[in-house]
Each structure stands twice: as structure tokens, then as C-alpha cells.
């Protein structure tokens, strides 16, 4: 048997490695416990004292903490996210000036490319990668056209590449870039820009369809609604839709339903033009659309002044906001469309004239149907085709 | 015009400062929050320069990490300022500079919970921070409240838009928080569910929350006044002025007559509360106290011309001054309501005026500061000073220095 004195030195490296592994495992376990303390912060300032204590400890760590810290930062808890961020900022600010720091770059690149993660920590990581590898972003961004967080930057880059191709007289390449930008853009100004570029190279691009704007309506009004009573007052169209009916409105004036298809570049319905200049009144817009299958979607709308929306007879958007301009996507409402026909009724209240008679009293509506990323959904109008003379 | 009589002192600031000190501890040299130590643009600080340029009497100039119109806050050797930038202006900054050297002491970078629409020049950093000397409280247009110690360590955060609904507001939440008797009070008026809330400065937890179902968007900051036998919390917005008990949030009285969208902060002097809203609104002087709707009984003065959308008014001795957004300024004698002078000041105005050491300072949007003699009943111009950068933020006066937040820098101006 070998003497104990010869075995002990032979075992020492194994013991040392084991101790290191145990220590590392314990450290990771401790990190996880500490990060979990911060995850418990929440409303009413809850958990702040404990969060600060572990924050101060974790902020002393090196960049080896970043993978678990960034994983924790991928949270929908806004309070916890900021506690984590203070740790991140302290470590990065300290380490960026140190020499020989072993940044977990592979993890960071994987993290920044993961569209399932929260956008804000991804942006933070991209900023750090750009400091460490300034050449990374330009190539990486070309692959982010479908990325919800970086889509706008990728579309802007694609448009710019198209412009460069056009300047080089390479219309074919430019067209490909512009088509790609148009298909992937979700921001309305980018959709419009891409459509303009496509038009400039002789291609058609329908902004209203791309954004899912509803442009074909039946309209009626103005119903009399003095002293902002219109929001609360239910007029006949809220009880039943009869497109042949006539109603009595302001000053005993009689009116019915009129068909109106807007030609506005972003599908805005100008009710002053369609129903007449009026104050303290209510107008209704009604339409029918079809979709192929049951689906979730978003009904996004804005109106001047306030609007209420019913989908298939059920209220889906109710906002009493006077002196309220028609702003794109002002109200975002999750909806469920049914396969086949769906009806949309909108009540648009018109407020009193501003005390300055030179201030025009606008009355308008804008409504679209899209997915949660803002891409217009595919639908058909179910209204009969308008026959033009 | 017929106003109730009020006891007016002719001595520089004395009455107003004494009145204000009933409600606030007096920090002669500090500028701890929106509109200074008394929340009315006045300070007891002295030795403030009256002559400068982009280079003359500039003690230091520090770049800012983003936009904002929050005024700087000064406490001892620290100058604290907020800013926002980035995607949807969701990147929030709180920066502390050394008051003497301008060197950065600390810089906290945080995320805004729920960016709303915003004004490009102010982003999410319209509300001014406030400090009690032990902690700094910041509120952003994203609905986030952060508390730091004086060395910049985060102590707690409230994400009000996450807890009570996203702020629906075309200029983002802009009301500056108010510290009063161990309560941090926030006015959160917007198109969604409006409310007032008082937080525990130590923990961030609610002490009380008062719903404001009739209030829509407003950007005015709350005011605290020492009325007859109690303090009243004054809130301006949505065509009216409301008073609440600051300890409980109980609504006390209401006065109608403001415009729908209110931005200026009411000011209090000689027992009367002065509120303004515009354009095309009213100046109203109100005798505080009472219960319920006191419009018919407590409004002692109304004046329709020269109302402002953004700038607040300032009262010095028995004179009420206001420059509207277009730079048309008036000075009224109070309580008589007699106009002492009218003057076009040149330029547009977003900043609210401040006064120190017998001088009155109006800063226009192109960065020209007009200095008037605040001891005179006449319009007496002492100087005009250009900083050569746009300025929308209200200045701070502290430790014999004039702090200007320009579109790009924080500038400390003092006698070299």
C-alpha cells in the first residue's frame, strides 16, 4: 500500500478543483438567491430595503455575473428591472476601463439577438457590444427586419441601402430593398416612406392595406348633443342599424346614412366634409368587414373629439376625451374577430366651438385593424361595391 | 377691480418669505425643488450676478445626457438635474454635479416604465426633482418616481403607470413633486384615471391617494399654502382649482374659472392665492378656506388679459408679475389690481421667472436673461445677458450663482 504521505499530494489538485467547483456552484446559487430578492420588488415600493442590500453586494462582482444578471433583467417587472440595471451599470462602468476584462461576448451576442427577450436590456447589451466590437451592429442589423425591438432601425438601414443603390443607378437592387422595407415596416412614417420609394421606382404600394386602415364606411349625423351630452346619450344607431332610416338632428334637420370612402393617405375620415360643419353633435360610422377565420387582433383608433367603438354589437373602446385630436393609434384595444362578417360601429362626438372663432372645430376618425406588432390584418370590406357614374 | 385687503409689506421679500416659511423649512442658500425654496421663484440668496455672456462669468458648463426642462436642484455642494433620451425617450438620467467645479459626482441611468407622447424639447424630464437634503426624489413623464440618497444610491422606485395605468398625455406627465411634512405629493392628471397621491419618502408607499375623476390632462404642479389655521394643498387643472388637506387627501374646496389645460403653478402671497391659465384664460385671486364650491364667495379678483400657457407668475412685495408665452409682460399692484407697467420683453417664454437680491430674472427661449430691478414699481431694466443656447427650463439661484439649463448644457454663472 502506498504511504499516506504519497497519496495526499496526489489528491491535492483534485481536492482543490472540487473546492473550486463547490465554491463556484455556491456562488452561482448565492447569485440566484440574491437576484431573486430583487425580483420580489413591486408596487408601493415593496422590497426596496432588501433589494438595495443585495444590489450593493452584487454590484461589487465582476463581468462573470453578467449572464445571470442579464437573464434576470429580462423581466416585465419595471421596478426589478431598474434595480438590476443599477448593478449592470456599475459593473460595466467599472470594467470597461479595466484591462484584461473577459467579456462574455458570445452570450451577449446571443442575448441581443433573442427576440423572445425584453427589448430594453437587449438595447443595453447592444450598446456595450458596440463599444467592444464597433463593427458588429451594421451587419447584424441587416438581419433584424422582423425583430420587434430593432425593426425600425433595420427598416431605416434597408431604405438607406435602397437609396444608395438608386444613386448607383441599380434600380433592380433598390426595388428589392424598398420591397423588403415596405413589407417589414410597422411604423406609419416608415410604411409611408417605403411606399413613396416603391412608387418612385414604378411599383404599387397600398399604405392603407399595409396598415389595416378601414376606409369604407356608412355615416350618419349630426345628432344634437348640447353641452357635451353626446358621449352619454345613446341615439338610435346604438339601438339598431337601419341604413334606410332617417333621423332628426340639430335644428330639426333630417338626415339618413351616406356611404363614404376616404381617400386620405392614412385613412382619416373627415366628418366635417362628409356630414357638415357643426358643433356639439354626434355622428356615427358603421361598416362590415369579413375575415377568413377567427383571430385575435387589435383595433386601433383615434378621433376628434371622443369616440366609442362597438365590434359585433359589443363595446371595445370607450374614451371620453374632449379637445382630443385624431392621433394615429391613440387607443389600442385587443379584439377577437370572428370568421366571416364582423360589424364595427363608431360614435364620434363633436365638442363645442373653441372660444376663439378662428380655431377650427375638427371632427374626424381614424381606425385600423392590425396585429400586435402593428401590421394590418387581412380583411375584406363586406359593404357592396360603390357604383360610380 | 375690487380686491379684499391684504397685509402688504414693502420690504423686499420679507412678508412672502415669512409666510412661506410657515409651510417650509427655510433654506436660504438652497434651491431644493421646482421654483426654489418657497416654490414661488423667490430666494433669500444674495450676490447673484447680473452680467454675463456665453463666456463672461461662466464658472462652469457641463454637457447634459439628454433633453428636459426640469429646473436644476441645488443642495450644499450638489447640483442635481434630470434628462431623457433614446427610444421613445425611455432612457432616464439623474445626474449630480459638483456645485463648485461642475465635475460629475454621479450619474444614474434608468428605464422609464411607460413612455407616452412627449414634447421634443422636454422628453420625459419636465418635472423638477425635489430634495430634503437627505434624499432626492425624481418624477418622470413615464410615471416613474425614484428616490436616491445624496450619493446617488437608489433607495426605492414607484412605477405609477404600471400600478395605476399608463399616462395618457400629449406632453408626458410634467407636474413637479412637492415635499411637505414627510409626504411626497404628486399630481397625476391625464386623460386616463387622474389622481393625487402622497408617498412616504422613506419607503415610497402610499400614505393616501385621492381620485380626481373630473380632471383630465394638466401639467401644473401642486402648491402648498398656509391658510388661516391649516395647510391647504392646491391643485390646478381642468377648468378649476381644487384644495385638499395635505395630510389626508380630503377635498376641501373648489373654484371654477381656469382653462381646461393648466400648466402654471399657483402662487400665494399676503393671504391670497393667485392662479393663472391660458392662453385666453383668467388670472384669479382667491381667498383660501371654505368648503365646497367657493367660486361665488372666495374669488376676489379676475383679470382676462395677459394669461400664460406655460410660465408661472411671481409676486414680489405688492407686485404680481407675469410674462406670457409670447413675451408680453405685465406688472400689477396687488391687491388693487392696478397695472403698474406693460412691456414686450422680446422672444418667447417657457421658463418661469425667479427673483433674488432685489433682481427679477426672465429667461427667454433663445437664452437671453432679462434682469429687472425688483425693488422698483416701474419697469427698470438692469441688463440683458445671452448664453447663446436655447433655454426652456426655469433657472435656479443658489449660493450666489445663477444656474441655467440650456438645450445642451447645465451652466453655472457667478461673479468670477
Image (cartoon, coloured by chain):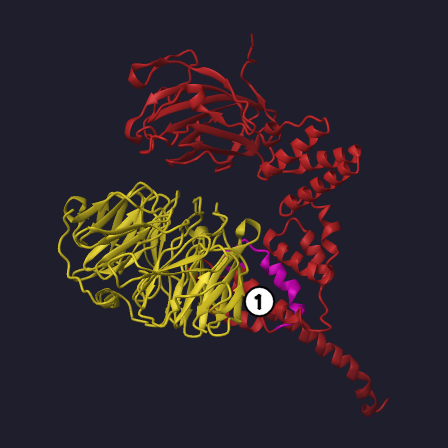
Chain colours: A red, B yellow
x then y, percent, for residue B154: 48, 67
- Taken as a whole, is the magenta stretch helix, strand or loop? helix
Q: Is residue A6 above or below residue B331?
A: below
Q: In this view, does B276 lie above or below B56?
A: above
Query: Looking at the image, how many numbered discs can be counted on the residues?
Result: 1
x then y, percent, for residue A50: 48, 69
Q: Is residue B138 above or below residue A200?
A: below
Q: What residue is shown at x 64% (from left), y 38% (from top)?
A: A185
x then y, percent, for residue A7: 82, 87
Of residues B209 and A360, which is closer to you in this image?
A360
Q: Look at the image and give the residue range highlighted in magenta.
A: A61-81
Of residues B364 and A313, which is closer to you in this image?
B364
Q: In which quarter of the image is residue B317?
A: bottom left
Residue corresponding to mark 1: A87
Q: Can residue B312 be seen in this view?
A: yes
Q: Mark 1 lies on which chain?
A: A
x then y, percent, for residue A77: 52, 55
Dot 1: what SS? Answer: helix
Q: Can residue B153 be seen in this view?
A: no
Q: Is A42 contained in the magenta span?
A: no
Q: In this view, does B153 lie to the left or right of A206?
A: left
Amino acid at each position: 500500500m502506498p504511504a499516506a504521505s504519497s497519496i495526499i499530494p496526489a489528491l491535492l489538485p483534485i481536492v482543490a478543483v472540487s473546492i473550486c467547483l463547490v465554491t463556484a456552484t455556491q456562488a452561482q446559487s448565492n447569485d440566484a438567491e440574491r437576484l431573486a430578492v430583487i425580483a420580489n420588488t413591486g408596487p408601493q415600493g415593496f422590497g426596496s430595503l432588501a433589494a438595495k442590500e443585495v444590489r450593493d453586494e452584487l454590484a461589487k462582482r465582476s463581468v462573470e455575473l453578467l449572464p445571470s444578471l442579464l437573464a434576470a433583467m429580462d423581466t416585465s417587472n419595471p421596478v426589478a428591472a431598474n434595480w438590476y440595471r443599477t448593478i449592470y451599470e456599475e459593473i460595466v462602468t467599472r470594467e470597461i476601463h479595466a484591462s484584461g476584462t473577459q467579456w462574455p461576448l458570445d452570450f451577449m451576442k446571443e442575448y441581443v439577438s433573442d427576440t423572445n427577450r425584453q427589448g430594453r436590456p437587449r438595447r443595453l447589451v447592444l450598446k456595450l457590444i458596440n463599444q467592444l466590437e464597433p463593427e458588429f451592429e451594421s451587419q447584424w442589423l441587416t438581419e433584424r427586419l422582423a425583430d420587434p425591438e430593432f425593426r425600425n432601425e433595420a427598416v431605416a438601414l434597408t431604405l438607406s441601402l435602397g437609396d444608395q443603390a438608386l444613386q448607383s443607378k441599380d434600380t433592380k437592387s433598390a426595388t428589392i430593398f424598398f420591397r423588403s422595407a415596405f413589407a417589414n415596416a410597422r411604423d406609419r412614417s416608415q410604411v409611408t416612406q417605403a411606399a413613396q420609394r416603391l412608387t418612385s421606382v414604378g411599383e404599387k404600394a397600398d399604405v392603407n392595406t399595409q396598415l389595416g386602415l378601414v376606409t369604407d364606411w356608412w355615416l350618419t349625423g349630426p345628432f344634437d348633443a348640447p353641452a357635451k351630452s353626446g358621449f352619454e346619450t345613446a341615439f338610435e344607431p346604438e339601438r339598431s342599424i337601419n341604413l334606410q332610416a332617417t333621423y332628426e338632428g340639430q335644428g330639426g334637420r333630417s338626415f339618413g346614412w351616406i356611404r363614404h370612402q376616404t381617400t386620405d393617405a392614412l385613412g382619416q375620415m373627415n366628418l366635417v366634409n362628409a356630414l357638415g360643419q357643426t358643433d356639439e353633435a354626434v355622428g356615427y360610422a358603421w361598416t362590415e368587414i369579413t375575415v377568413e377565420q377567427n383571430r385575435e387582433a387589435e383595433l386601433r383608433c383615434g378621433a376628434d373629439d371622443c369616440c366609442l367603438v362597438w365590434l359585433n354589437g359589443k363595446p371595445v373602446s370607450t374614451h371620453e376625451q374632449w379637445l382630443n385630436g385624431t392621433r394615429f393609434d391613440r387607443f389600442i384595444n385587443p379584439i377577437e374577430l370572428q370568421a366571416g362578417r364582423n360589424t364595427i360601429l363608431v360614435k364620434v362626438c363633436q365638442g363645442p366651438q373653441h372660444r376663439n372663432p378662428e380655431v377650427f372645430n375638427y371632427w374626424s376618425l381614424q381606425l385600423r385593424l392590425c396585429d400586435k406588432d402593428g401590421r394590418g390584418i387581412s380583411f375584406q370590406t363586406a359593404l357592396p361595391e360603390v357604383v360610380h357614374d | 377691480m375690487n380686491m379684499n385687503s391684504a397685509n402688504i409689506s414693502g420690504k423686499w421679500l420679507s412678508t412672502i418669505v415669512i409666510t412661506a416659511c410657515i409651510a417650509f423649512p427655510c433654506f436660504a442658500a438652497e434651491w431644493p425643488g421646482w421654483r426654489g425654496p418657497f416654490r414661488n421663484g423667490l430666494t433669500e440668496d444674495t450676490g447673484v450676478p447680473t452680467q454675463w455672456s456665453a463666456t463672461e462669468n461662466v464658472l462652469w458648463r457641463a454637457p447634459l445626457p439628454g433633453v428636459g426642462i426640469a429646473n436644476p436642484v441645488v443642495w450644499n455642494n450638489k447640483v442635481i438635474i434630470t434628462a431623457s433620451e433614446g427610444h421613445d425617450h425611455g432612457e432616464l438620467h439623474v445626474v449630480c454635479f459638483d456645485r463648485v467645479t461642475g465635475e460629475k459626482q454621479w450619474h444614474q441611468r434608468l428605464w422609464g416604465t411607460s413612455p407616452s407622447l412627449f414634447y421634443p424639447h422636454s422628453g420625459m424630464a419636465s418635472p423638477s426633482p425635489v430634495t430634503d437634503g437627505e434624499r432626492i426624489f425624481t418624477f418622470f413623464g413615464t410615471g416613474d418616481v425614484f428616490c436616491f440618497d445624496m450619493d446617488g444610491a437608489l433607495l426605492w422606485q414607484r412605477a405609477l403607470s404600471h400600478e395605476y395605468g399608463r399616462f395618457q398625455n400629449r406632453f408626458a406627465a410634467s407636474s413637479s413633486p412637492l415635499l411637505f411634512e414627510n409626504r411626497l405629493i404628486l399630481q397625476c392628471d391625464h386623460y386616463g384615471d387622474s389622481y393625487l397621491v402622497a408617498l412616504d419618502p422613506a419607503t415610497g408607499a402610499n400614505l393616501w391617494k385621492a381620485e380626481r375623476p373630473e380632471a383630465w390632462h394638466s401639467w401644473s404642479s401642486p402648491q402648498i399654502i398656509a391658510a388661516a389655521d391649516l395647510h391647504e394643498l392646491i391643485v390646478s387643472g381642468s377648468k378649476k382649482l381644487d384644495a385638499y388637506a395635505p395630510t389626508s387627501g380630503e377635498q376641501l374646496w373648489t373654484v371654477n374659472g381656469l382653462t381646461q389645460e393648466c400648466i402654471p403653478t399657483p402662487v400665494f402671497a399676503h393671504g391670497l392665492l393667485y392662479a393663472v391659465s391660458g392662453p385666453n384664460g383668467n388670472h384669479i385671486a382667491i381667498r383660501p378656506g371654505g368648503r365646497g364650491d367657493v367660486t361665488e364667495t372666495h374669488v376676489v379678483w379676475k383679470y382676462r388679459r395677459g394669461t400664460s400657457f406655460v410660465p408661472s407668475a411671481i409676486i414680489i412685495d405688492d407686485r404680481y408679475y407675469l410674462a406670457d408665452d409670447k413675451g408680453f409682460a405685465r406688472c400689477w399692484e396687488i391687491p388693487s389690481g392696478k397695472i403698474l407697467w406693460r412691456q414686450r420683453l422680446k422672444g418667447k417664454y417657457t421658463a418661469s421667472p425667479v427673483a433674488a437680491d432685489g433682481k427679477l430674472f426672465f429667461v427667454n427661449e433663445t437664452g437671453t436673461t432679462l434682469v429687472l430691478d425688483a425693488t422698483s414699481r416701474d419697469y427698470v431694466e438692469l441688463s440683458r445677458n445671452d448664453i447663446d443656447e436655447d433655454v426652456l427650463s426655469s433657472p435656479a439661484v443658489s449660493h450666489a450663482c445663477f444656474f441655467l439649463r440650456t438645450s445642451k448644457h447645465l451652466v453655472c454663472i457667478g461673479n468670477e
